[in-house]
Amino acid sequence: MQDSDSIGIVSPQRVYFDTPLNLRSGVTLDSYELVYETYGELNANRSNAVLVCHALSGNHHVAGVYADNPKSTGWWNNMIGPGKPIDTRKFFVIGINNLGGCHGSTGPVSTNNKTGKRYGPDFPMVTTVDWVKTYTRLADQIGIECFAAVIGGSLGGMTAMQLALDAPERARHIAIIAASAKLTAQNIAFNDVARQAILTDPDFHGGDYYSHGTYPRRGLRLARMLGHITYLSDDSMATKFGRELRNGSLAFNYDVEFQIESYLHYQGDKFADLFDANTYLLMTKALDYFDPAQDYAGNLTAALAQAQANFLVLSFTSDWRFSPERSREIVKALLDNKLNVSYAEIPSTYGHDSFLMQDDYYHQLVRAYMDNIST
Amino acid sequence: MITEANKPLLTLRPDFATIADWIVPESSVLDLGCGDGTLLRYLKNKLNIHGYGIEIDTHNILACMKNGINVIHNDLESGLSGFENASFDYVILSQTLQAMRNTEYIIQEILRVGREGIVSFPNFGYWKNRLQVAHGHMPVSSTLPYQWYDTPNIHLCTLHDFEQLCQQHQINILERRVTNHDRKVTLFPNLFGVLAFYRFGHTTL
């Protein structure tokens, strides 16, 4: 069912760029397409645009529904819409599918014009630095000199932070939610297990499964199941599933016995139906590579010296994958640079996924912050 | 659009006004236990200071956000580790000292992070407090509005006590102001003062 203050029917747009893009990996992409959605109206000054950066498995469909599918609600529909924390009566909101994605923007699934074949494993590695370049080009295209705000959760928060560093004059506010200034070794380890699940799937064929007519479904499914465990918290799993059995008694075999197994299998299957394995590999790598302090001998304060925006940093108490400590490191570096920053640690039980959930305090904080952004 | 942040601030709480009196325009201010951010908002609008508030209470953090001031969620009891040495002109601790567990530590932290510290607290030496104690009861008043069993105030002190602590830590008291219901008290301040305000800095050797 659609809530009354939802944005309603939306449709994606597509923009083609033929200016070569020099990627951080050293590879140049001659041309590419980006898919995006917009909600609300761009004001006369073109000063009310809010860019929403998506997380690992996200896309451009942030709010509203598609005409042909009433269940296709955008992933941040509870946050964005008329009267919602990011109010589309005030802001012109843009959702974008990252380069390398599998929901319309050029990525491994796309056809390479030079070869007439899908890019597959030949699609170059992309990083937050590259995405920021594409975001500013899209902004140029739409005629937005400076975003009122750039907002993101998880990998999206990191990309928002990258924009504050690489294009400081192009955003007045940056919101970094449930993110980190760099992944911990534990996080990289989780990502690698996820990647190994895909890379070692016999149907992977070095990433060229498209031309083999196969799909590394088992690998992607496992990767997602692992990821999903880390995005929840022990408490939320215990509350939701406990040790509840699916059929009431132990079967003493390897079929699904516990409800949590059933849930994870379902999530894994659903994801494997919707997502491209190569894109998943690319996006987890982009996460691993993110480390703006790297060029400054590990000094995040020095890295953030270029930033000019005002910042909102939010973390969630039960998020162990991107814990509040990681957010505090960002806050510390912003404070060292005497930048305007507000930071709140939000009591939560849903783990990393909290940033997608409907939570009163969380939404009120975002609303309060956004209300004070003058356009 | 009228938001909390751009609504005019008509009157400032008298105790905040006393503190605001000491702040030099354009300076940097860290307000510990900043509540809903009223003081910082005033200082920002009137004196163009650059400041941050520190709060632990979620309602207050939200109120600060509505007030359009920088607020950082932090537990003061764990110190100010997120802040570099001498990074602020002033560090304010307004009517919070008496509720802190690590009182000595926070005073040291104030002077580590700030060039000057400003502290205010209810004077336990006020004669009405003494009278209530003399009658065998813990004081309850407008500045100490709690019963002994539900009070957050665990480290109450008098002017003499605070000054002694400063002496022990070689803290240089730069200015003191004592008030009784908006009036300055100069005669026997430890007896007639309800609220005490101190501005202090490092001892110059």
Image (cartoon, coloured by chain):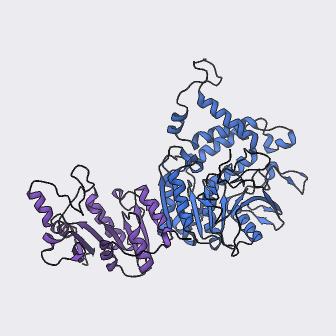
Chain colours: A blue, B purple
Where in the figure is residue A99, as x and y percent of width and height?
Answer: 75, 57
For the N terminus of chain A, give its image quadrant.
top right
For the question of whether residue B88 can be seen, the reply is yes
| Depth check, front residue: B91 or A370 | A370
Residue at 25%, 58% (x, y): give it: B145
For the question of whether residue A24 can be seen, the reply is no
| Depth check, front residue: A99 or A40 | A40
Q: Quadrant of residue B205?
A: bottom left
Q: Quadrant of residue B113?
A: bottom left
List the single residue furthest toward the bottom. B25
Where in the figure is residue A375, as x and y percent of width and height?
Answer: 62, 72
**For residue A275, side relative to residue A250 (left or right):** right
Where in the figure is residue A21, as x and y percent of width and height?
Answer: 78, 65
- The correct choice, above or below, for A227 with respect to B190 in the image is above
Where in the figure is residue A45, as x and y percent of width and height?
Answer: 68, 76
List the single residue furthest toward the left. B134
Q: Quadrant of residue A20?
A: bottom right
Residue at 77%, 45% (x, y): give it: A69
List the single residue furthest toward the front. A4
**For residue A143, side relative to residue B58 (left or right):** right
| Depth check, front residue: A196 or A106 | A106
Residue at 15%, 71% (x, y): give it: B192
**For residue A375, side relative to residue B81 (left or right):** right
- The correct choice, above or below, for A190 with respect to B176 in the image is above
- The correct choice, above or below, for A236 with respect to A12 in the image is above
**For residue B175, side relative to residue A43 (left or right):** left
Exactly how many numbered labels are in the figure? 0
